[in-house]
Amino acid sequence: MNAADVNLYLVGFMGTGKSTVGRAVALRLGFQLLDSDHEIERTAGRPIPELFAAEGEAAFRARERDFITAGHPTQRTVVACGGGLVVPPGMLAQLQARGVVICLHASLATILERTSRNRHRPLLNVTDPEARIRELFAVREPIYRQAGTVILTDSRPLTEIVAHVVRSWRREATDWVRRTPAAP
């Protein structure tokens, strides 16, 4: 595979800008953008809050795994991953085997501000969303940091974030191709 065709997976906590940055990066690279949450909603025929309510989080995580293992193109795609997608054991390795993984990061204050505008996050449909965010962030942050490159999205213009992501992807895609055996 050519380095210019390697998929990019954006991971990170909810509210760090994965979908927004992903759209801009895909446009700049001439790749298609897939948002894992939107793709799961499309294939399931209902929104994520309904999936969580009807099936539970474990079933939703199984849908995420299915999407990663068989539900998207293997080249020229930017995938904006749901915030919890890399949390189950082995999922980060699954992504890293399929392309470059970059983690978008933001401060807790920024995440709280950004997520307060969105009521479609089932994990935050609790009495104290701030406490839930702090709890989830504490568990997930060490996993996100294992992803590789971490790019801060706090108080930075989108164009600067996109340029940083593209530079990192180009460098890492070349390394990824070098260390990934060619398919038979």
Image (spheres, rainbow, N blue to C red):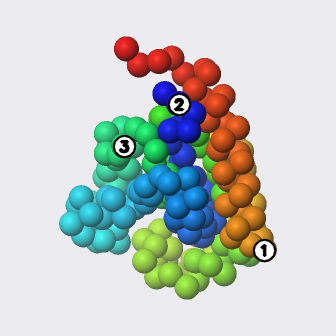
Q: Is residue 99 left or right of residue 62?
A: right
> Residue 155 shows which numbered tag?
1
| Disc 1 packing (10 Å; few <14; some 14–19; many ≥20) | few
Location of mark 3 (residue): 73
Asked whether 34 or 154 is in front, the reply is: 34
* Horizontal and vertical percent position of residue 145: 70, 46
Distance of label 2 from label 3 (alpha carbons): 15 Å
Q: Residues within 10 Å of mark 3 (few under 14, many from 20)?
A: some
Q: Amino acid at mark 2?
A: Asn
Question: What kind of residue is marked 1?
Answer: Ser
* Separation (CA) of disc 1 from disc 2: 34 Å
Q: Nearer the viewer, mark 1 or mark 2?
A: 2
Tell me which corner region of the image, top left, top right, bottom left or bottom right, holds residue 113: bottom right
Look at mark 2 in the image and give the residue it sits on.
2
Q: For numbered disc 3, what is the local secondary structure? A: loop
119, above or below 69, in the image: below
Does dot 1 land on a helix, a strand or a loop? loop
- Give how far apart the Cα atoms at labels 1 and 3 are: 33 Å
